[in-house]
């Protein structure tokens, strides 16, 4: 799966409308529109999971900079860093103050 960032869309766009636009170029598996935790108002960007990298790249190529309702779409592939094993390090103890 490839994660795709989509921003700049009109705030009243629904998940279905965003998927329909991107689905012309890529197989969308999931979508998550980012919303304010308190107000639930859309923040203007979303993350989609795309089935394969080739179609994700095609969607970016075709849709990045495209206009929707007077706003420019911004699409990019989210490059995720490989998971590294987390090693806990001991913190030095401070001497007790007297």
Image (cartoon, helix red, strand yellow):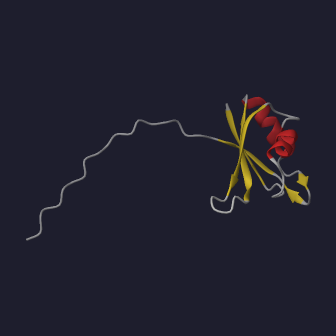
Q: Quadrant of the C terminus?
A: bottom left
Q: Quadrant of residue 58?
A: top right
Q: Residue furthest bottom?
A: 98
Q: Quadrant of residue 76?
A: top right
Residue at image location 92% in from the left, 57% down from the top: 69
Left or right of residue 9: residue 81: left
Position in image of residue 62 (x %, y %):
87, 41
Position in image of residue 41 (x %, y %):
73, 60
Residue at image location 83% in from the left, 52% down from the top: 73
Position in image of residue 19 (x %, y %):
82, 40
Q: Quadrant of residue 70?
A: bottom right
Q: Residue furthest left?
A: 98
Q: Quadrant of the N terminus?
A: top right
Residue at image location 69% in from the left, 52% down from the top: 34
User: How many marks overall?
Assistant: 0
Residue in the foreground of this view, choosing between 42 and 84:
42
């Amino acid at each position: 799966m490839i994660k795709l960032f989509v921003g700049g869309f009109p705030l009243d766009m629904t998940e279905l409308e965003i998927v329909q636009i991107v689905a012309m170029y890529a197989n969308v598996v999931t979508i998550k529109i980012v919303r304010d935790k308190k107000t639930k108002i859309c923040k203007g960007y979303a993350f989609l999971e795309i089935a394969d990298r080739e179609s994700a790249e095609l969607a970016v190529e075709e849709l990045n900079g495209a206009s929707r309702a007077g706003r420019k779409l911004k699409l990019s592939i989210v490059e995720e860093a490989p998971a590294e094993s987390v090693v806990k390090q001991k913190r030095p103890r401070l001497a007790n103050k007297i």
